[in-house]
């Protein structure tokens, strides 16, 4: 060291001491001086370094002699001083600590520093980004209120290349909410009454906040009476007491009731509305099959469409009733278990069928108007509320009919004979052909077996041809009764209007049937 100045020797000493320390590494140092803006740090090198006070988390607590960890940015600047950074040292130390102790998905505590574009910066040992969408459970809240708060966050993303971290406060709140709900749900007991606040209203019910867990108050459990929409009973923010109906602890679901706070109107309903009594009520709903009558709040009975009138033929209840009508009816049946009451409106009047047998004795002649035609017969109105049926088989002794309209027309007045009366099932059988004597005994005499005759083909089928013997009297010539066996379609042999000669093969009075043959005797 001879021939060198004292300063040169000292510089050489410091350089040798710092050979193993590289720029960008952390070093220990002591505060040797504090000015209003900076702190002078001695790291044991030939010169000190200055660090702005705003790089220290708590500048007010700094004092001379404090040991601090700093990052060596450069061993010498233009002024011959080392360049140090407390902020970068904290960031480097914080990053190393987080890489060692935390992974994505872990919860970490941090202090919200400031609001930035798109979210907030949080100090977790280094600055991490909290997106605005991950601050609260729902929507974007006022971010300013969080500045300065120390909170818990979930690490959702660690970018090792860029050394940045993305946090979520929302995930922590959601987890805390689930833990709170799981804890609260175990305190709920079936049938107990709990206070709550109406949190949300839908078409099917309302969600009630029970103090950390939401329960569903279904529209059917709001009132014993008819409710069109939940908003008729509750409003957002309402404080109400509800009954716990069911608790599903596994799925964290709670069913609530409001009407259950009062006795059911269906209790002892058989005593209040015994069968046969007359009641008064208001029409509250009309459907194709009947009308619902409100007897009292929460108690409705159904008047089925078949119980509206003895006489009128009603296709829809709105032909008789309208919503809001106040009517009297008779209780027909009560089922408290199924919560059903059957009512009758027509029972308020005398049943015209009660004396049907006396008024329409079997064998008597009656007159009426054809009301409806069907494929199997015609309904004849004898009086308002009482119809009789003329079956197609009772319309003619001899004529082969395919539809009643060949003889009868809707709206025409006809005379008929009463064949049967069933008061219980409200049915009367009528006959048109019974107005005249049965001609078949005479037909058998007139057309004996073996008689030869000539007739006209009126209809061709796949099994033969119908031949008119006289007005309204036909015989059947089966294809098997031709002179010689044939194959093929009878329509190729017979044409409507053809004149043919045949003999009587059989004449059956009971079946009202004549069979013809062309075979030789």
Image (cartoon, helix red, strand yellow):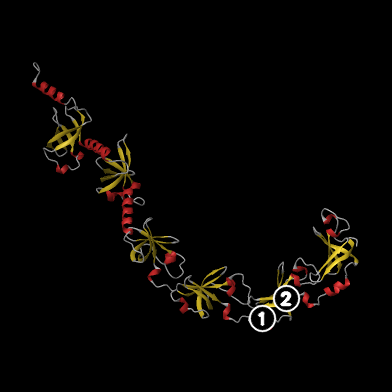
Q: Which residue lies furthest to the bottom in this view?
A: 358
Image side of residue 105 versus residue 420, left or right: left
Image side of residue 467 versus residue 49, left or right: right
Quadrant of residue 347 within the rendered picture: bottom right
Q: Which residue lies furthest to the top in this view?
A: 3
Rendered image: mark on residue 314: none
Residue 309 vs 41, above or below: the answer is below
Quadrant of residue 501 within the rendered picture: bottom right
Residue 390 placed where, x, y %? 73, 73
Residue 490 placed where, x, y %? 83, 56
Separation of marks 2 and 1 at Cα, in angstroms: 13 Å
Whether pointer 2 and pointer 1 mark residues with C-beta atoms closer than 8 Å, the reply is no
Image side of residue 202 versus residue 371, left or right: left
The residue at the point 27 percent across, 37 percent down is 99
Mark 2 closeness class: few <14, some 14–19, many ≥20 residues within 10 Å: many
Question: Which quadrant holds the N terminus?
Answer: top left
Residue 375 vs 39, above or below: the answer is below
Residue 28 vs 460, above or below: the answer is above
Marker count (numbered): 2
The residue at the point 39 percent across, 72 percent down is 262
Question: Which quadrant holds the C terminus?
Answer: bottom right
Residue 345 placed where, x, y %? 56, 77
Task: Decide if residue 141 is in sight here.
Answer: no
The secondary element bearing badge 1 is classed as: helix
Going from the N terminus, do you reach mark 2 or mark 1 first? 1
Q: Mark 1 points at which residue?
A: 356
Q: Mark 2 points at which residue?
A: 430
Quadrant of residue 416 within the rendered picture: bottom right
The residue at the point 39 percent across, 69 percent down is 260
């Amino acid at each position: 060291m001879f021939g060198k100045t004292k300063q040169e020797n000292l510089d050489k000493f410091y350089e040798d001491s710092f050979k193993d320390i590289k720029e960008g590494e952390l070093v220990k140092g002591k505060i040797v001086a504090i000015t209003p803006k900076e702190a002078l740090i001695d790291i044991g090198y030939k010169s000190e370094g200055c660090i702005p006070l705003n790089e220290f988390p708590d500048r007010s607590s700094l004092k001379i002699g404090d040991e601090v960890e700093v990052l060596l940015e450069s061993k010498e600047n233009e002024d011959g001083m080392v360049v140090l950074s407390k902020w970068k040292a904290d960031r480097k130390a914080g990053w190393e600590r987080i890489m060692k102790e935390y992974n994505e998905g872990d919860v970490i505590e941090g202090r919200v520093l400031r609001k930035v574009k798109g979210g907030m910066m949080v100090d977790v040992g280094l600055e991490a980004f909290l997106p605005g969408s991950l601050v609260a459970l729902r929507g974007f809240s006022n971010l300013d209120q969080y500045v300065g708060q120390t909170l818990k966050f979930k690490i959702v993303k660690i970018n090792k290349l860029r050394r940045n971290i993305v946090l979520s406060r929302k995930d922590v709140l959601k987890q805390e909410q689930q833990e709170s709900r799981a804890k609260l749900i175990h305190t709920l007991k079936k049938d107990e009454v709990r206070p709550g606040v109406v949190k949300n209203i839908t078409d099917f019910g309302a969600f009630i906040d029970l103090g950390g867990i939401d329960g569903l108050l279904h529209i059917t459990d709001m009132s014993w009476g008819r409710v069109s929409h939940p908003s008729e009973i509750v409003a957002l923010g309402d404080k109400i007491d509800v009954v716990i109906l069911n608790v599903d602890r596994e799925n964290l679901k709670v069913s609530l009731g409001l009407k259950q706070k009062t006795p059911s109107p269906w209790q002892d309903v058989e005593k209040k509305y015994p069968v046969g009594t007359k009641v008064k009520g208001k029409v509250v709903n009309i459907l194709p099959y009947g009308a619902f009558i409100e007897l009292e709040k929460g108690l409705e009975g159904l008047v089925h469409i078949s119980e509206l009138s003895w006489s009128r033929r009603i296709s829809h209840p709105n032909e008789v009733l309208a919503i809001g009508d106040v009517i009297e009816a008779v209780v027909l049946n009560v089922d408290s278990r199924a919560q059903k009451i059957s009512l009758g409106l027509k029972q308020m009047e005398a049943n015209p069928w009660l004396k049907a047998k006396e008024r329409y004795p079997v064998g008597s002649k009656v007159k009426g108007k054809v009301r409806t035609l069907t494929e199997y017969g015609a309904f004849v109105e004898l009086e308002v509320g009482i119809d009789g049926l003329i079956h197609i088989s009772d319309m003619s002794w001899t004529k082969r009919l395919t539809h009643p309209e060949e003889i009868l027309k809707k709206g025409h007045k006809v005379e008929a004979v009463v064949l049967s009366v069933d008061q219980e099932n409200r049915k009367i059988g009528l006959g048109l052909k019974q107005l005249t004597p049965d001609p078949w005994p005479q037909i058998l005499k007139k057309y004996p077996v073996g008689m030869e005759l000539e007739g006209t083909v009126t209809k061709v089928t796949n099994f033969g041809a119908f031949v008119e013997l006289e007005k309204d009297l036909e015989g059947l010539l089966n294809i098997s009764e031709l002179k010689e066996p044939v194959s093929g379609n009878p329509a190729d042999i017979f044409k409507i209007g053809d004149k043919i000669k045949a003999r009587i093969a059989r004449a059956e009075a009971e079946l009202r049937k004549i069979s013809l043959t062309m075979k030789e005797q």
